[in-house]
């Protein structure tokens, strides 16, 4: 990953898990160590990254790798406790092996376990620090091929970090402790702390905690050093989430994560290990996410991530694909998207800045738009191999927040995901964008590069077919298709957002499912709501979900419909032009006439079973409605009027 829009993807053919990666800094290359005990050298300088060399370990299992800055030697530790040295240019073993028994000599009587850490001294690249799992530490002189010092601690080691002066190093252990060692007195650590351990009243050693899996020790010229580690929490809080702890002076900050931590890396001002490190950010790789923490601010906010780590952050409910878009569209969307800084995020730019962003290998720009269950809409650049998020729009911001207990008193909303996006329309040339939501509304958006503070215009449309409460039509007295003017009340369209609510007792009428904000709303640059169109309740029955949407941006028209009818709105004049029921659309003169829906036995059914139950119930509900209509048609076809019905069937339907 580099600057926003810069990323490349590499796949190992073996499919083995990646244990560790090491950059060849400023050389456009990468070394990967895999679980099948193979090392790979990748060339990142070409358009499609490829493996230049591979090296397979057959007799030993790889546990840790270290590549010093500007070095041609790669140090490889193994499960047996041996350390091998690989020439990075030829990618072959040098023949120099630091055997475990020679490294520890008589410091311990048992095998020290696998190599868990390797690092060169910041003061002398000819000295190598080797950490073994059982708590043994060896400072090895590569030139004289002997150990300068050996140290031992009675808790297992998980990681080691140097002070930039090369005189001290810090170890993290399995009991949640951190030990600080001095090269001049390696007999015991000169400082031992358990950051999250409870201090005992009798002055004994603090309680043990969970293992500290990794620690980094970064110095600053004008302030206290940063000690950053993962794990180490107390055992008495088993439900706490995975965490990263930042110690700066006497301040200890615990950052809880949504997912387990895989690894983390501190970004510093210099790549040279013997200088003040001056850390400014921490990159934390989680199992399902990647976050970057800003260390330059005392509250340690995170940077807004420009990469689509999880496209299903909120479930995707609909998608649209657009190819050969106007060439200026992607940069414009990205520029307005970059200005949208959320609360709680760092106000600084994304700190990873390598590479140069281009539109990819395609000769035409491609854009994918995704609608989500929480009402958000995301615009993605699909021109490259991976998706790059350009801009995010929250459609829920045009509506008032539903207060607890208020829903049943005013207008019920969908029980789950009331703002879920069902359909979208986008005209890349005019930049008109239209969204249909699960709560029977349509929002028309216009694109603007300038911030505005204005009220949101809204229309309410009455679109509902009603039939008399007749259980079964009698064939002797009633014709199969009654006169529309006598059996169905005329449909009305109500415009404006201040309609009065006519209620019979508690029966809802002319109420939309959601309330549009009546006060002026600040709209940042980007897509700004121009008009909200909502279907309303009719005589105690909720509006049906919108099933079709069409927009003509040249004429300023938006048309939408559901199983009740069709509406056409002029969004330039903000006026309802047409509101027509299904029966009027398919009148008796139409050869493709439809059978009206079966009469409802009770209107109370709709009040108790609000159809807006969320996307999960949308399609089953629609299927049920179709089956009911088909069953009604079958029952009527057994009567003497079957010839009349046969005449009204679609010519494409089967003959039975």
Image (cartoon, rainbow, N blue to C red):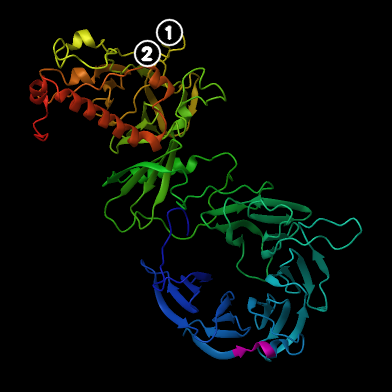
Q: Would residue 24 be seen by someone viewing this image from the given angle?
A: no
Q: Would residue 286 be seen by someone viewing this image from the given angle?
A: yes
In the image, the segment drawn in magenta is 97-101
Q: Nearer the viewer, residue 84 or 80?
A: 80
Q: Position of residue 281 (x, y in %)?
A: 61, 56
Left or right: where 47 falls relative to 103: left
Q: Is residue 307 above or below residue 510?
A: below
Q: Residues within 10 Å of mark 1 (few under 14, many from 20)?
A: few
Q: Residue at x 65, y 53 (%)?
A: 295
Quadrant of the image containing the C terminus: top left
Q: Residues within 10 Å of mark 2 (few under 14, many from 20)?
A: some
Mark 2 to mark 1: distance in Å?
8 Å
- Where residue 314 is drawn, which disc sits there? none
Q: Residue at x 57, y 47 (%)?
A: 348
Q: Secondary structure at mark 1?
A: loop
Left or right: where 605 falls relative to 425: right
Q: Residue furthest right?
A: 202
Q: Nearer the viewer, residue 319 or 129?
A: 319
For residue 428, which quarter of the picture?
top left
- Where residue 504 is drawn, which disc sits there? 1
Q: Is residue 246 above or below residue 95?
A: above
Q: Position of residue 271 (x, y in %)?
A: 60, 68
Q: Is residue 9 above or below residue 101?
A: above
Q: Nearer the viewer, residue 123 or 581?
A: 581
Q: Are marks 2 and 1 in contact (CB under 8 Å)?
A: yes
Name the N-terminal-most of marks 2 and 1. 1
Q: Secondary structure at mark 2?
A: loop
- Where residue 539 is drawn, which disc sits there? 2
Q: Is residue 585 above or below residue 40?
A: above
Q: Position of residue 380 (x, y in %)?
A: 38, 47
């Amino acid at each position: 990953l580099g600057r926003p829009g810069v990323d490349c993807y590499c796949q190992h053919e073996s499919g083995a898990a990646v244990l560790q990666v090491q950059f060849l800094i400023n050389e456009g290359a990468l070394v990967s160590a895999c679980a099948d005990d193979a090392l790979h050298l990748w060339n990142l300088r070409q358009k499609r990254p490829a493996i230049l060399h591979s090296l397979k370990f057959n007799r030993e299992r790889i546990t840790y790798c270290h590549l010093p800055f500007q070095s041609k030697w790669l140090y490889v530790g193994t499960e047996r406790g041996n350390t091998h040295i690989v020439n990075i240019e030829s990618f072959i073993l040098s023949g120099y092996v630091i055997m475990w028994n020679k490294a520890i000599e008589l410091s311990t009587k048992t095998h020290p376990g696998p190599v868990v850490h390797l690092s060169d001294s910041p003061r002398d690249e000819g000295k190598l620090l080797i950490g073994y799992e059982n708590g043994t530490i060896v400072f090895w002189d590569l030139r004289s091929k002997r150990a300068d010092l050996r140290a031992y601690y009675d808790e297992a080691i998980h990681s080691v970090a140097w002070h930039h002066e090369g005189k001290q190093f810090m170890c993290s252990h399995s009991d949640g402790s951190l030990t600080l060692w001095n090269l001049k007195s390696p007999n015991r650590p000169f400082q031992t702390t358990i950051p999250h351990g409870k201090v005992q009243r009798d002055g004994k050693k603090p309680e043990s905690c969970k293992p500290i899996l990794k620690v980094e020790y970064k110095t600053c010229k004008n302030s206290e050093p940063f000690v950053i580690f993962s794990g180490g929490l107390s055992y008495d809080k088993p439900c706490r989430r995975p965490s990263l702890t930042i110690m700066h002076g006497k301040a200890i900050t615990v950052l809880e994560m949504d997912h387990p931590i895989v690894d983390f890396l501190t970004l510093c001002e210099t790549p040279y290990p013997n200088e003040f490190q001056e850390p400014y950010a921490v990159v934390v790789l989680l199992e399902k996410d990647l976050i970057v923490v800003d260390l330059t601010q005392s509250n340690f906010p995170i940077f807004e991530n420009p990469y689509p780590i999880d496209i299903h952050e909120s479930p995707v409910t609909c998608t649209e694909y657009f190819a050969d878009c106007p060439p200026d569209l992607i940069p414009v969307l990205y520029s307005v998207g970059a200005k949208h800084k959320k609360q709680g995020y760092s106000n600084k730019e994304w700190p990873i800045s390598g590479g140069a962003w281009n539109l990819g290998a395609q000769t035409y720009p491609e854009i994918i738009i995704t609608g989500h269950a929480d009402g958000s809409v995301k615009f993605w650049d699909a021109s490259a191999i991976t998706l790059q998020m350009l801009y995010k729009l929250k459609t829920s911001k045009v509506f008032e927040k539903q207060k607890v207990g208020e829903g049943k008193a005013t207008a019920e909303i969908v029980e789950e995901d009331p703002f879920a996006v069902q359909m979208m329309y986008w005209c890349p040339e005019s930049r008109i964008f239209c969204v249909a939501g699960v709560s029977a509304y349509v929002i028309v958006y216009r694109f603007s590069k300038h911030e505005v503070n204005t009220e949101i215009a809204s229309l309410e449309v009455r679109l509902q077919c009603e039939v008399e409460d007749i259980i079964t039509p009698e064939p002797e007295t009633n014709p199969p298709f009654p006169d529309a003017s006598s059996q169905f009340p005329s449909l009305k369209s109500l415009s404006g957002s201040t309609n009065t609510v006519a209620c019979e007792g508690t029966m809802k009428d002319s109420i939309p499912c959601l309330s549009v904000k009546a006060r002026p709303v600040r709209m940042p640059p980007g897509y700004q709501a121009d008009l909200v169109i909502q279907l309303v309740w009719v005589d105690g029955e909720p509006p049906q979900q919108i099933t079709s949407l069409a927009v003509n941006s040249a004429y300023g028209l938006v048309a939408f419909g559901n199983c009740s009818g069709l509406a056409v709105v002029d969004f330039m004049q903000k006026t309802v032009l047409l509101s027509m029921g299904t029966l009027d659309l398919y009148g008796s003169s139409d050869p493709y006439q439809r059978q009206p829906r079966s009469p409802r036995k009770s209107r109370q059914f709709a009040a108790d079973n609000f159809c807006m139950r969320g996307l999960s119930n949308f399609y089953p509900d629609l299927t049920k409605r179709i089956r009911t209509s088909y069953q009604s048609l079958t029952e009527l076809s057994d009567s003497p009027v079957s010839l009349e019905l046969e005449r009204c069937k679609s010519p494409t339907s089967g003959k039975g």
